[in-house]
Structures are given as C-alpha cells and as structure tokens.
Image (spheres, helix red, strand yellow):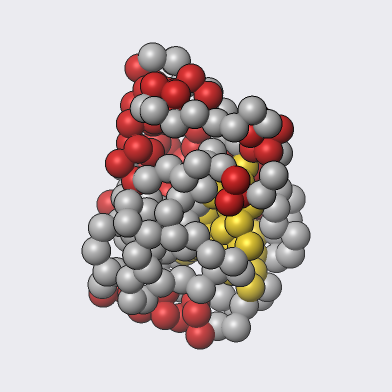
Amino acid sequence: MSSSDLPTLKSSQVKQVDALCAERFGIPTEWLMEAAGWQVARLVDRPAVVVCGVGNNAGDGLAAARHLHRWGLLTALCCVDIERLRGPAAQELEALRRHGIEPSGELRLDGARLVVDAIFGTGLSRPPEGRFARWIEAINASGRRVLSVDVPSGLDAETGVAYAPVVHADVTVTLGLPKPGLQGEVVVVDIGVPAEAYAAIGIELPPDAKVQIRR
C-alpha cells in the first residue's frame, strides 16, 4: 500500500485528532511530539542541520535534533524565532539546552548534507513572510537534500495549496496520515495516534493501514 491509498488528514482535522488523543485517549501532545522526533531522526542518514520555526512542528524538529545530536549527525540547530516557542516545543528546547545545545538565530548550513525542515507545519494558512520566507528561499537555493517534517514549509495543509515560497522537499516524513498537497517522495510514519481517534472524526482506515503506518 502506498501513501496515496491512505486517507488524507487536513489541518483542521489534525487539531481535532490531537485534542482527542489528549482528552479521550490519554496521549498528550508531548508524547506525540517525542514519537514524531524519533521517527524523523531515524530517517536521517547524513550530517544534518535542523531548521525550526514556531509551534508544534518546531517541537517535532527539536525532538529530532536531540536524537541526531546523540548519534553525531547534528551539524547545527537553527530557530527562526526562539522567543516564540511555547508549550511542548519550549520543553523540547529546554531539554536540548540541558544537553548543551544552544540554537542559532541565524541559518547555518555549513557542514550539513541534509536540511531537516521544521519551519511550518499543518497550521500555516497564509504565505510565509519576513525571515521565515528568507530562510525558506535560502534552503531552496542551497542545493542540499531536504527532508520536511509532516509537510513542506509553505504548504497549506487544509487546502493543499503551495504558497510562495514553499520548501522544495526531496522527501516528506508525514505524521500519522498524509496531508493534502504532498508531492514527491512521501514517507508515512506512526506516531502513536490510535485508529479510534481517526474514526471519531469520520476517517476510517483501510483494513491493512495499520501495517502501512507501522514503521
């Protein structure tokens, strides 16, 4: 089964599923973030820079960065706006700092053979602007291989529209289920969302979907 055989999950549905996981099934956002970071990190096979924005997508990237640091694969951690990190993402940042890793407020690609794109996730609903847009453009111009977390930054996961600029991802590691508008190589990974949470919002998984998303 390919990712195209699985149902897609829109941005608004992601929020519903996250809330159900926490409120009905006892799976907090922090657990999902940890699982996402692990799944992303284990698919990195070369020295990488992790580039984070704000929100939970940044938290996924920060969790991945901690694992990559342990494995000697992290060349740099760059955050567009460190001061705006809140909640679980801020907790991931604190864990990194306790490991002696201080994020850079500048984009540092030297030494990296891969860029892990965790700038924007499914919450984006308008074109990137300012430093966010400049960093996306610099990543695209770098010539490095790019792995995007959940969606390429600049993609509207509600409509599937790719804004300008949008990260040109070589591979997208999408979490739980595919999102609208994904193109190119898409890897679907399991982060621990129960099938019952999807069913509660009207998404029924195909009979063999559990095998497909168990990676």
Residue 168 visible in the snapshot: yes
In the picture shown, does residue 141 fall above or below 95?
A: below
In the picture shown, does residue 154 fall above or below 15?
A: below
The structure residue drawn at horizontal position 38% and vertical position 38%, both measured from the top left corner, is 14
Query: Where does the N terminus fall, quadrant-wise?
Result: top right
Q: Is residue 197 left or right of residue 114?
A: left
The structure residue drawn at horizontal position 44% and vertical position 24%, both measured from the top left corner, is 199
Q: How many numbered circles does the render carry?
A: 0
The structure residue drawn at horizontal position 35% and vertical position 17%, both measured from the top left corner, is 23
Q: Is residue 58 left or right of residue 38?
A: left
Q: Position of residue 186 (x, y in %)?
A: 61, 57
Query: Where does the C terminus fall, quadrant-wise?
Result: top right
Q: Position of residue 108 (x, y in %)?
A: 52, 74
Residue 52 visible in the snapshot: no
In the picture shown, does residue 26 fall above or below 32?
A: above
Q: Nearer the viewer, residue 142 or 69?
A: 142
The structure residue drawn at horizontal position 44% and vertical position 15%, both measured from the top left corner, is 25
**Residue 87 falls in image quadrant:** top left
Q: Is residue 191 left or right of residue 21?
A: right
**Residue 201 falls in image quadrant:** top left
Q: Position of residue 29 (x, y in %)?
A: 42, 30
Q: Nearer the viewer, residue 164 or 45?
A: 164
Q: Position of residue 113 (x, y in %)?
A: 68, 73
Q: Nearer the viewer, residue 132 or 127?
A: 127
